[in-house]
Amino acid sequence: MVSADGLKTWFDYQLLFLGLAIAFVLVASAGSRLLRYLGRSRSRTQASSPQPRRSRSQSREVVSS
């Protein structure tokens, strides 16, 4: 028969693992939202720039013209 102390320890570990799993899901979700937000703000700043950057080949064509 399992002792009461053994059951208490088992429940303690179950609660610990459950808490760690919930914390992991919350951190992963928050990280995903943060990366989505940063990606969205980066695309907005690129879209609002006045002139797009020219590639090196386009710069050479302008100089040689």
Image: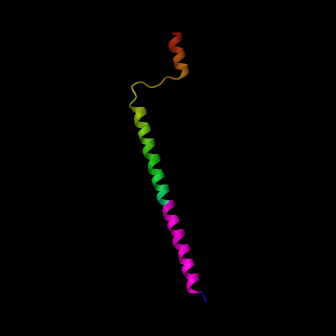
- As drawn, the residue found furthest toward the top would be 65
Q: Position of residue 64 (x, y in %)?
A: 54, 10
The N terminus lies in quadrant: bottom right
Q: Position of residue 33 (x, y in %)?
A: 44, 50
Q: Position of residue 26 (x, y in %)?
A: 46, 59
Left or right of 20? Residue 44 is: left
Give whichever of 11, 55 is nearer the camera: 11
Q: In the rendered view, would you say 29 is above or below 49?
A: below
Q: In the rendered view, would you say 40 is above or below 7?
A: above
- Residue 42 lies in quadrant: top left
26 inside magenta stretch: no
Q: In the rendered view, would you say 4 is above or below 27?
A: below
Q: Residue at x 55, y 21 (%)?
A: 56
4 inside magenta stretch: yes
Q: Residue at x 45, y 46 (%)?
A: 36
Q: Main secondary structure of the magenta part?
A: helix
Q: Position of residue 11 (x, y in %)?
A: 53, 77
Q: In the image, which residues are magenta?
A: 3-24
Q: In the rendered view, would you say 41 is above or below 52?
A: below
- As drawn, the residue found furthest toward the right would be 1
Q: Residue at x 52, y 23 (%)?
A: 55
Q: Residue at x 53, y 70 (%)?
A: 16
Give whichever of 12, 18 is nearer the camera: 12
Colouring chosen for the image of the structure: rainbow
Give whichever of 30, 12 is nearer the camera: 12
- Number of marks in the rendered image: 0
